[in-house]
Image (cartoon, rainbow, N blue to C red):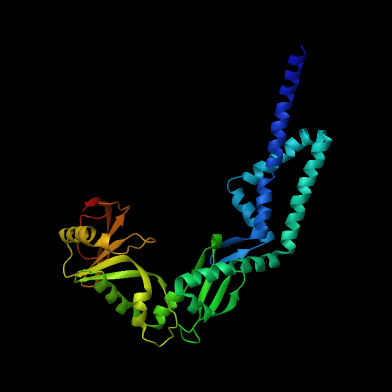
Amino acid sequence: MENASDSKTLLKKVPGIIGTVLFFASFIPAVYAVYKGFTGVFFGLQGFAWFFGLPAILMTFALQLFFLIPLVCLLYQFFFGRDYISKHKCLKIAALIVTGIVATSALISIVFAEKSLDIKYSMFQPKVRQYLTDRYGEEAYDNTTFEIASRYEMITNAYTPVLPKDKPYQIQIINDGKIFDTLVNEFVAANEDFLPSFRQYIIEKENIPAGMNVEPDIVSIDFRDYKYGDDFTVLFERTEYEIKEISVDLEKVTDDVVMDIAGEVWKDIYSDIPVCKTYTFSIMFTENGAKAATVFFHNPKESTVTATFLVWSEWGGSSGLGDQKIELTR
């Protein structure tokens, strides 16, 4: 009889135990929002910036509210707290302690929001150094000076001998600690002949057939002691690149020609060139300089690829390839 009585007592306690666990678990969204108050939220509409303290907490709650998470947790805390927690002194004290810790932590994150921003910026600097040295070389980094352009956007202006003296490039720390910089863009803009000459270098190096051009994505340049105004052709061999597009200009674009060239690129060229990993590889066909059609290679495997086709609306010709999916095989 005692065993049966104990079992009934335990069964009565189980819902309360489960409910209590869920009650304290319902504070997790608030804890996470406060955590983001310290670590920051990268957010923007017209422009992105980092937010700490109260703005970060509110943004995190707003995102959670999209899934109704804070509302559900708050309602559960109110009703279960009223009907169960309030009737058990120890649980009531524990709930007050948790609430106090969360509220105090939120207040601290608000008071020290500016300090959190400074700490975040400082913590990223070793990563910025590694990022820049990997892309442009240790010597280029050592010859660069930096000044903060925007603390909230975490944008730094960098001055390097690679560019004209009054022309900095920008480094920005974006979401999840990713780093973005504009040195290659600024370098190409300051040296108008670099990209056409570099394309020709790639065509010769990769044995691209006559009549085809390439669009490279520059991954890194080991500048070493290069200075603006020096002969930039010395950088070609020290430039890592990927090819994101091959272009062909024809007097007349037809479906048969598009298919023949797409097949040729897949069979004889694609596997031998460094293909861009951040863009879908494409072949652009122009007719006397005007865009006609583009072929995209999707999910390439060892011997096959799925090709899709885009026919440009401004082209005066006609094609039956638009929106088709065709498998090309080596």
Residue 134: give x, y in percent of width and height. Answer: 47, 70
Q: Which residue is at 50% across, 72% downward?
A: 132
Q: Is residue 139 above or below residue 12?
A: below
Q: Residue furthest right?
A: 89
Q: Nearer the viewer, residue 106 or 61?
A: 106
User: Is residue 154 shown left or right of residue 298?
Assistant: right
User: Is residue 151 shown left or right of residue 212?
Assistant: right
Q: Which corner quadrant of the image does residue 290 belong to?
A: bottom left
Q: Which residue is at 27% across, 66% downward?
A: 246
Residue 229: give x, y in percent of width and height. Answer: 40, 88
> How many numbered marks appear?
0
On the question of residue 246 being in view, the answer is: yes
User: Is residue 151 shown left or right of residue 293?
Assistant: right
**Quadrant location of the N terminus in the rendered image:** top right
Q: Nearer the viewer, residue 9 or 238?
A: 238
User: Is residue 90 shown left or right of residue 38?
Assistant: right
Q: Which corner quadrant of the image does residue 263 belong to?
A: bottom left
Q: Which residue is at 35% across, 81% downward?
A: 234
On the question of residue 192 being in view, the answer is: no
Residue 238: give x, y in percent of width and height. Answer: 37, 75
Q: Residue furthest top?
A: 1
Residue 293: give x, y in percent of width and height. Answer: 25, 62
Q: Nearer the viewer, residue 202 or 81?
A: 202
